[in-house]
């Protein structure tokens, strides 16, 4: 399984503009083959700082995700909105423990 | 490295009450030995649904975290606020890819 965690910073005043685009990409992503979960959360302490978390069945599913029309559309929307910072990393998951 | 992703659902109207407790536990957690990152984000589509993400140096650091006074205080605060759902899983990270 692949666990993705990421951070995306936009201007706090752009959150309302970004939200419908986020909704579109999140909902389409959740329907993809191999997508186990996908969520975006706005940092509880820093408005405009978006915390991304996803789980994928395998690398192939994640690679296919990057080429989907909804991801292409989301990236275009983000480019227009303006991204202040972005870092997203995918990790192959080993031992898992429920906390 | 250990990657933690989790979900915590509280009533949306309790977010303002919960936020100072979140701030306290997040800030104290970030100062712990072996804590590489710690963030809580409120789901951009579902108010009151909190997405937790953390990275830890190793299992030992994460185990020590669970016993800290700020985590004990946070759990007590949460119990008082009322938790509708909670699932948190830690994964040992293997291969990593920047996306």
Image (cartoon, coloured by chain):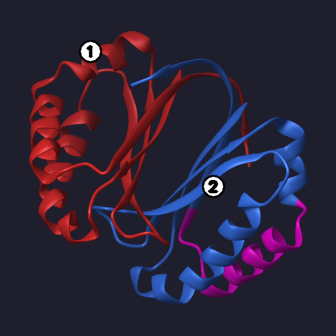
Chain colours: A red, B blue
In reply to whether residue B72 is colored magenta, the answer given is yes
Whether pointer 2 and pointer 1 mark residues with C-beta atoms closer than 8 Å, the reply is no
Tell me where residue A26 appears, x and y as whole percent. 25, 44
Tell me where residue B44 appears, x and y as whole percent. 31, 62
Position of residue A19 in the picture relative to residue B79 (left or right): left
Residue under circle 2? Answer: B38
Position of residue A95 in the picture relative to residue A92 (left or right): right
To which chain does the residue with label 2 belong? B
User: Which of these two is toward me, A62 or B23?
Assistant: B23
To which chain does the residue with label 1 belong? A
Tell me where residue A70 appears, x and y as whole percent. 13, 33
Task: Look at the image and give the residue range highlighted in magenta.
Answer: B67-85
Residue under circle 1? Answer: A64
Query: Is A53 rendered above or below residue B15?
Result: above
- Identify the residue at the far front of this view: A84
Query: Is B72 rendered above or below residue B16?
Result: above
Comparing labels 2 and 1, the label whose residue is closer to the camera: 2
Q: Is the magenta stretch mostly helix, strand or loop?
A: helix
The quarter of the displayed image where residue A77 is located: top left
Is disc 1 placed on a helix, strand or loop?
helix
Q: Residue at (73%, 75%) from the top-left corner?
A: B74
3D distance between C-alphas at marks 2 and 1? 29 Å
Q: Residue at (59%, 60%) from the top-left corner?
A: B86
In reply to whether residue B30 is colored magenta, the answer given is no
Q: How many residues crowd around disc 1 within 10 Å: few (fewer than 14), some, or many (20 or more)?
A: few
Q: Residue at (26%, 15%) from the top-left corner?
A: A64
Q: How many residues crowd around disc 2 within 10 Å: few (fewer than 14), some, or many (20 or more)?
A: some
Query: Is A83 rendered above or below residue B48?
Result: above
Q: Residue at (17%, 57%) from the top-left corner?
A: A18
């Amino acid at each position: 399984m692949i666990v993705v965690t990421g951070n995306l910073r936009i201007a706090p005043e752009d959150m309302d503009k970004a939200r419908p685009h986020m909704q579109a990409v999140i909902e389409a992503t959740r329907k993809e083959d191999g997508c186990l979960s996908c969520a975006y959360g706005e940092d509880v302490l820093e408005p405009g700082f978006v915390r991304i978390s996803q789980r994928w069945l395998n690398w192939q599913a994640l690679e296919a995700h990057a080429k989907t029309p909804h991801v292409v559309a989301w990236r275009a929307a983000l480019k227009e909105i303006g991204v202040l910072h972005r870092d997203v990393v995918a990790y192959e998951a080993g031992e898992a423990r429920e906390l």
